[in-house]
Image (cartoon, grey):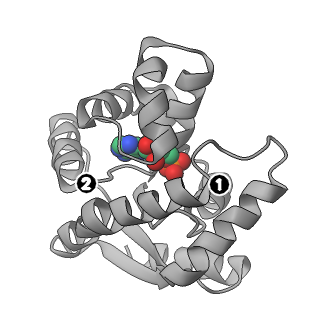
Amino acid sequence: MKLIFLGPPGAGKGTQAQRIQEAHHIPQLSTGDMLRAAVAAETPIGKQAKDIMARGDLVPDGVVVGIIADRIEADDCANGFILDGFPRNVAQAEALDAMLLDKNIALDAVIELAVDPDVLVQRILKRAQESENGPREDDTEEALQHRLRVYEEQTAPVADYYAGKGILRTLDGMQEMDEVTQQIEAALKEF
Ligand code: AMP
C-alpha cells in the first residue's frame, strides 16, 4: 500500500502513521524526522534546513523531493510506504506523481486528518511540554502559528489535488486516537 497522511501540525498524523506502519509492515517516511536527523548530524542539508525549520517555513522543494526519491528506492519500501509530512505543496505533489510514474507505482490512498485549528496550538504546546527529548525548536507559539498559516496556504490545496484524483479520504482527527485508527483502517479497506 502506498499512502499519504495529510493534516496540520498536531493532527496526530505521526502517531497514526506509526500505528499503520506496525499493522501493515510498511515504513513511515516522515520528511520532518529525516530533516531533524540531518540537522542533528549537521549534514549540508541539515545546515541548509535548520533556520528554515526553526521559523516554521518549508525547506526548498528540491531538497525534500530528493530525499523522498532516494528513500522510496530502499528495499523496505518494496511493499509500500506511508508518506508523513510530504507532499507539503502542490509542486511537491506533482513531483511525486512524476517520480511514481517513472517507477510505475500508483498511490492507493491519501488520508487527511481534519482538526479544529483552535485546539491545535494547545495540543502541540502540551506535546512539547511532555516530550521526553525536550521541545522541538519549532514548537514555540510563534513558530507554531506560522506553521499553521503555511499549512493553510500551501498544504491544504494538496487535499484538493488528491480529491480531484478520487483517492482522498478526510477523517475526523478530533476523535480519540483509537477511534481515528479504526477509521483509517476502515477507509483503507475501501481501496
Ligand atoms: P514536521 O515534523 O512534518 O512538522 O516538519 C517539521 C518541519 O520540517 C516543517 O515545518 C518544515 O520546515 C520541514 N519540512 C518537513 N517536511 C517538509 C516538506 N515536505 N517540505 C518542506 N519542508 C518540510
Above or below: residue 111 compared with residue 119: above
The residue where tag 1 is placed is 18
Q: From where the camera sits, is residue 63 visible?
A: yes
Residue at 51% across / 40% down in the picture? 54
The reply to whether callout 2 and callout 1 are in contact (CB within 8 Å) is: no
1 vs 92, left or right, is right
- Tally of marks: 2
Query: Residue 125 falls in which quadrant of the image?
Result: bottom right
Q: State the quadrant of the N terminus.
A: bottom left
Q: Assess disc 1: are there few (<14), some (14-19) or many (≥20) residues with their C-alpha within 10 Å of its C-alpha.
A: some
Q: State the quadrant of the C terminus.
A: bottom left
Above or below: residue 127 compared with residue 106: below
Residue at 48% across / 22% down in the picture? 46
Amino acid type of the residue that numbered disc 1 sits on in the rendered structure: Gln
> In the depicted view, which residue is nearer to us: 134 or 174?
134
Residue 137 location, x and y as percent? Answer: 62, 42
> For residue 49, which numbered disc appears in the image?
none
> In the depicted view, which residue is nearer to us: 188 or 86?
86
First reached walking from the N terminus: tag 2 or tag 1 = 1
The answer to whether the residue bearing label 2 lies less than 8 angstroms from the nearest atom of ligand 1 is yes
The residue where tag 2 is placed is 89
Amino acid type of the residue that numbered disc 2 sits on in the rendered structure: Asn
Q: Secondary structure beneath disc 1?
A: helix
Q: Secondary structure beneath disc 2?
A: loop
